[in-house]
Image (cartoon, grey):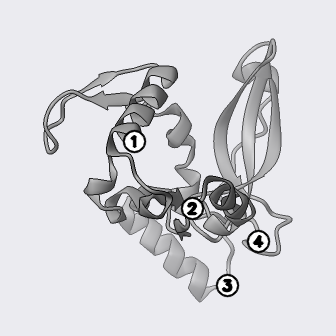
Amino acid sequence: AAGVVAGLAYFASKYNFNIFVTRDAVNDEELQPGWQYSYVPSICAFCSSTCDILVETEYKNGYMRALEIDGNPLSPLNEGKVCPRGRAGIFRTYNVDRLKTPLIRTGPKGTWSFREATWEEAINYIMQNIKQLNPQPYEFLLIGGGIPCANYKPYFIPFTLGTQIPNINGTPMQTCLFSDQVPIGFVI
């Protein structure tokens, strides 16, 4: 297969041909009876470039789900293109192995021993641990994992003024890399 692709690429470049891979038009009803299909414009949040994207969606009985992510051809920024990370973004929502609930540590750090918790339980757990530490506002650090962080700046400043937490770490780092770059000790 690779030889065929290489041969076609060579032939196309030598003789100035354009090769288009297309499929026949498909009636929406052939895909899933009763579903409506559409494209929803959005912005990719997997790096600081924030490329314009179109999300192919299907809709039925008040339920909408994303099918595929493509570049927006009307975008002057990315001109209808999107990188592999952006196209794979659909799996961030639909990956069966993603975390779906908060986890609370049950064993020592460095071991994978957690239990599932409700959001209310997790927030109470965090508040209890912070109260036990009894930190002063200047001892607190707010970490803002950015997608990109410039979008959150208008919210960080009023929050830090209101809570008297002067330390902010905002980064336009990709969400998939952010957890590697934040020290483990920051996790309660």
Which of the two discs, 1 and 2, sits closer to the camera?
A: 1
Q: Secondary structure at mark 2?
A: loop
Q: Residue at x 44, y 56 (%)?
A: 136
Relative image position of residue 104 (x, y in whole percent): 32, 29
Residues packed near mark 2 inside 10 Å, few (<14), some (14 to 19) or many (20 plus): many
> Which residue is under mark 2?
146
- In the shown orientation, is residue 128 left or right of residue 71? left
Which quadrant would residue 67 be assigned to in this image? top right
> Which residue is under mark 3?
16
Relative image position of residue 4 (x, y in whole percent): 43, 65
Q: Is residue 106 visible?
A: yes
Give the mark nearer the N terminus: 2 vs 3.
3
Query: Relative to residue 94, is residue 19 depicted above or below?
Result: below
Residues under labels 1 and 3: Cα distance? Answer: 66 Å
- In the shown orientation, is residue 104 left or right of residue 98? left
Give the mark nearer the N terminus: 4 vs 1.
4
Name the disc covering residue 61, or none.
none
Q: Secondary structure at mark 1?
A: helix
> Which residue is under mark 1?
130
Q: Quadrant of the C terminus?
A: top left
Q: Secondary structure at mark 4?
A: loop
Query: Relative to residue 26, is residue 145 depicted above or below?
Result: below
- Name the foreground residue: 78 vs 10: 78
Give the mark nearer the N terminus: 1 vs 2.
1
Residues packed near mark 1 inside 10 Å, few (<14), some (14 to 19) or many (20 plus): few
Amino acid found under the numbered disc labelled 4 = Glu
- Name the foreground residue: 140 vs 46: 140
